[in-house]
Amino acid sequence: MWCESCQHETSEKNCELCGNITEPVTPIDTYWCKECEIPVIIKRSSNNHKCPLCGSEIKKLVKDIRPVFPEERLLVEILLEKPMKYANCSVWAYNNRYYINGKSIEITSSYYKKFNPEYIISQLEKYKEINTYDKFDLIIERFVKANAVHLQEIIEEAHTFIKQEATNYPIENIVLSFSGGKDSTVTADLAVKALAEPKLVHIFGNTTLEFPLTIEYAQRFRADNPLSIFRTAINREQNFYNVCEDIGPPARMMRWCCSMFKTGPITRVLNRYYRDISILFNIAVIRICTIARLIIDVIHPVLDLAILKDTFTAEVSECFELFQGSRDF
Ligand SMILES: [Zn+2]
Ligand SMILES: [Zn+2]
C-alpha cells in the first residue's frame, strides 16, 4: 500500500501518518545502469539506488519505460534518416520519447509527416534481413535478470490477491476474458498458476477486426493449454465496415464498436453459460490488470506474442462496464 501525499509505504488501508486512503500499488521509477545498459525498476519507497547486477550507481530516468523492438527501432532510425545506426544500442521508450543508451530524443508527429508511407515501407523492407534480434535479446535477458526480485514480488502479490478473490467461487464460475494480447495472456497465466487449476474457462473476444497474428496466437494458446475451457465470443450477424457505412465510424462520444463487437458478444456467451449464476469475471478486472500491467512491463519483451498497439486502458474500462453487469448492448 502507498500513501501518495506522504510518499510512504505501509501495510494499512489508511496511512498512519496522515490518515488518507492508501493506494494498493507502490509506484515505481525507472533508473538507468550505464554499465549494464539497462533500465532498473526501483520502488519509490526504496533508498537503494544501485544496480542489482553490477552494483554501480544508477541514475533516475523516467517514471515508466517499455522496450523498443528492433522493428520499431528501425522505424525510428528511418524517420531520423539514420537506418541501423542504433542497432547495437539499448533502446527504450516512454510515450513519444525514445531512450537510446540512456539518452533521450523526442519523436513528434512531424517526423511521421516528413516521408510518405510507401517510402517508409520500402526502407523497412530494405533493412529487414540485417535487422536481427541479437543485441535486443542480450539486453532483454540482462534486464529480466536485473529486475527478477521486483518481478517475483509482484507475481506473489498477484497470486495472493487472486486466491483471496477466488475463495467464494467454484472453479467453474471463474471466467477469464482472453483477447489474445499480452495483458490477458499474463492475467490468464497468473490465474491458472495462483489457483493451480489448468481447467479455467477462457472467453476469447473476437472483435472481427483481429490481426491474423492474434488469431494465430489464440489458436496456439488453446493448443498449448489443452485442459482449459476455451469459448469464442463473436458477432456473426454484423460486419464492422458495413456498420461504419450505416452509422459512421466509432467516435469518442459514440463508441458503438466495443459494445457491438466486444462486450456485447462476451456478455451473450456469459449469459448463455451462466444465466443468473454469480461468476468471478477476470478476477476483479481492474486490480488484477494493474498488477498484470506491472508484470508485463518487466517480462513482456520475452513473451512470444503478436506485438500490438496497447489498448490496455480501453480494455479495462470496457471490462469494468461488463463486470458491473450493464446489459444495454
Ligand atoms: Zn499519508
Ligand atoms: Zn549494472
Image: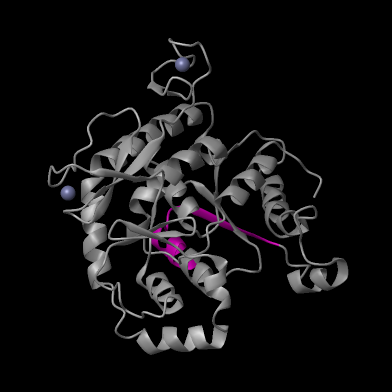
- Give the residue at x 48% y 51%: 183
Q: Position of residue 51 (x, y in %)?
A: 19, 43
Total marks shown come to 0
- Give the residue at x 13% y 42%: 55
Answer above or below: position of 111 versus 91.
Answer: below
Instruction: Name which quarter of the figure residue 147 lies in.
Output: top left
- Give the residue at x 42% y 64%: 305
Left or right: 38, with 54 as reference point: right
Q: Nearer the viewer, residue 166 or 251?
A: 251
Answer above or below: position of 288 versus 307.
Answer: above
Left or right: 144, with 154 as reference point: left
Part of the protein shown in magenta: 219-234
Q: Position of residue 327 (x, y in %)?
A: 78, 43
Q: Position of residue 169 (x, y in %)?
A: 54, 31
Left or right: 244, with 115 as reference point: right
Residue 303 within the magenta-colored segment of the rendering: no
Answer above or below: position of 90 versus 194.
Answer: below
